[in-house]
Image (cartoon, rainbow, N blue to C red):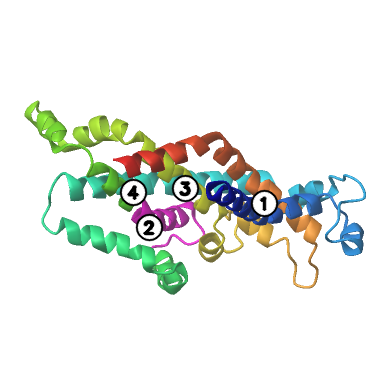
Amino acid sequence: MAALVTKWLVTAALVIVAVAALYPLLFTIINSFKSRAGYARNPLGLPDGISLQNYVETFTRMQVPRLLLNSVVTTAGGLLLSTVAALLVAYAVTKLRIRGGNLLFLFVISMLVIPSQVIIYPLYETVLDLGLGNSYSGLILSYAAFGLPMSTYLLVAYFRAIPDELIEAARLDGAGELRILFQILLPVSTPAIAALSILNFVWMWNDLLLPLVIMGGSDNTTLMVGVALLSGQYDVSIPLISAGLIIALLPVLIVYLLFQSQILNGAISGAVR
């Protein structure tokens, strides 16, 4: 009887958490189909009718194809660069046994406890000094820097579970270090790489702070910044902003729904190892 009560309590708690998590998304979807007058009359209710006017206006004002291309380029570049860098650092720390490797690892993951807002101004000044302001390169490097600590942490935990005998056997066969990394460890670590890639993709795509600071209002800015700019100084249209958010979030929802099993498998395999 106690077990049954516990089961129902846990289920009820999970349902409440799920409703609380999904409500903002449902609220945004519903409001994206409302007119301004309809939202003013009933902000929490269902729309009087389905209208795509907000989506049409959003595409016109945001130049969605251009901003979508910017988001794809910067997110893909940051994701690729952070993953490759994390692979190299994790391999050096776990399998090369370099002097000071543990200190290097601790230094990299210590960045996880530093809020991005604390270092945003020095980062901005550095990007400007390098001549990378308002450019893809500046944002890609920034994404890679912020994505490196978590990626390194996950890959180090995964690499440490791989037997050193496998590496030694490859070295005896004449394989170089890069060949060992990319032809032996990389295929074995596919679940962990898939999981961290999806997690990094989600935050890079949804990030607003770095693109807003580095790109400003240039044509190279991302889709999320375009949504933020829909809000004028004296005019805020919740239905219009809701439509912009749905457009910006749609790629993330698609990727997450398609690859959620990889996230779970990567987390489980890392924990089991």
Closer to the camera: disc 1 or disc 2?
1
Q: How crowded is mark 4: few (under 14 residues within 10 Å), some or many (20 or more)?
A: some
Q: Distance between the residues labelled 1 and 4?
A: 28 Å
- Left or right placement of residue 227 versus residue 263 in this view: right
Front one among 169 and 251: 169
**Which amino acid is tagged 4?**
Leu
Q: How crowded is mark 1: few (under 14 residues within 10 Å), some or many (20 or more)?
A: few
On the image, numbered disc 1 is attached to which residue? 22
- Which of the 4 quarters of the picture holds residue 231? bottom right
**Which amino acid is tagged 2?**
Ala
Asked if the residue under mark 4 is in contact with the one under mark 3, i.e. CB atoms within 8 Å, the reply is: no
Instruction: Locate the C terminus and report the quarter of the image it occupies.
Output: top left
Position of 130 relative to 70 (above/below) = below
On the image, numbered disc 3 is attached to which residue? 199
Residue 144 shown in magenta: yes
SS type, badge 4 = helix
Residue 69 shown in magenta: no
On the image, numbered disc 4 is attached to which residue? 154
Closer to the camera: disc 1 or disc 3?
1
Residue 134 screen position, x and y as percent: 52, 59
Q: How far apart are marks 1 and 3 (CA)?
A: 19 Å
**Mark identifier at residue 145:** 2
Of labels 3 and 4, earlier in sequence is 4
What are the residue bounds of the magenta stretch? 130-151
Q: How far apart are marks 2 and 3 (CA)?
A: 15 Å
Closer to the camera: disc 2 or disc 3?
3
Residue shown at 61%/43% (left/top)? 253
- Which of the 4 quarters of the picture holds residue 83? top left
Can residue 242 be seen in this snapshot?
Answer: yes
**Which amino acid is tagged 1?**
Leu
Of labels 1 and 3, earlier in sequence is 1
Q: Distance between the residues labelled 3 and 4?
A: 11 Å
